[in-house]
Image (spheres, rainbow, N blue to C red):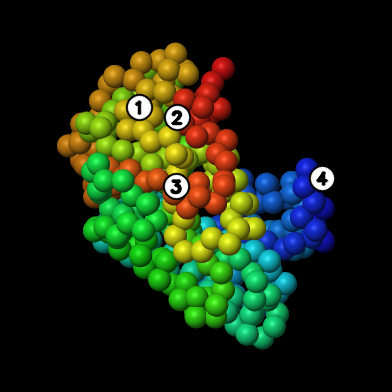
Amino acid sequence: MTTRPTGEYDGDGRLAVVAGSSGLIGSALVEALHARRWRVRRLLRHGSGAPGADDAVWDPSGGVLDASALDGADLVVNLAGAGLGDRRWTDAYKATVLLSRTSSTALLATALARGVREGRVSPGVRYLQGSAVGYYGDRGEEVLTESSSRGAGFTSDLAASWEAATRPALDAGISTVYLRTGIVLATGGGALGRMMPLLRAGLGGPLGSGRQWWSWITVTDHVGAQLHLADSDLTGPVNLAAPGEARQREVVAALAGELHRLSVVPAPGLALRAVLGEFAGDVLASQRMRPAALIGDGFEFAHPDVASAARALVGR
């Protein structure tokens, strides 16, 4: 068995199975689970590194997952899938992104349902499934809660298909949550990680008009919300965004201010489209998403507004 660090909370040896554990959020989640004395079993793709004693190897594209990988799981978290911003959006890459997310989700949901039916997984297991703010599409000034309708466009179709791939788990009565994630702020990766060199050089500024709403959340709060949801009764979509709504230019200005830099150099929409292609539409989209379910369930954000997030991330 792997050695677990001592944490502030005794998880009583509960087992969490995490897919997508090497990413920005997944790696932080694994660390937080260990700190609370959960046992963690990472689902690792073939060739992605040497598995530990508690880990399991799977191949979503080939439909390969040992049934015993989920045995005894109290929590299953799926964050696996190719990144939207990793490459320019060609038809081929969009197909790759869609397949990487739906195939891994369908495989995991099917195995989880089978485990419950066969008595190897408790019917009380919690299943947290990755999703995204893109579900809502570009909605301008509209306030978006978990009850808001689906939007239009590739990312909306992608998120809807991603969530729909959990059907086997739903049919088995498994408690399932969709993590509709906003822009994740972290200096070590994600959107902010790419922006930091520009901000430090004083070259950060509005993207397009800068008036579009950015639904954002820090890694700390994203992981905290997942830990909260592990013991919650919430099911269905849960918006993962800070309650402090902000426009894109306000987010950049707060971060630049903590760095004592200006944030006035704009990136025109036409230039972004020339560089990013179709993905620029998502960068320029306005999504005013509110975390109504989390707030109603009593979750307390460590960074509820952009000022506190900026201080935590880049404050000196």
Quadrant for residue 115, please give it: bottom right
Mark 3, Cα crowd under 10 Å, few <14 / some 14-19 / many 20+, is many
Sequence-earlier tag: 3 or 1: 1
Residue 70: x %, y % from top left: 66, 72
Cα–Cα gap, marks 1 and 4: 39 Å
Amino acid type, label 4: Thr
Rendered residue at 37%/23% (across/down): 253
Please name whichever residue, 50 or 158, is drawn nearer the observer in this view of the structure.
158
Which residue does the numbered mark 4 point to in the structure image? Answer: 6
- Which label lies toward us, 1 or 4? 1
Q: Are marks 2 and 1 in contact (CB under 8 Å)?
A: yes
**Left or right: where 88 falls relative to 209:** right
Which residue does the numbered mark 1 point to in the structure image? Answer: 250
- Which label lies toward us, 4 or 3? 3
Mark 2, Cα crowd under 10 Å, few <14 / some 14-19 / many 20+, is many
Amino acid type, label 1: Glu
Sequence-earlier tag: 2 or 1: 1
**Left or right: where 40 falls relative to 314:** right
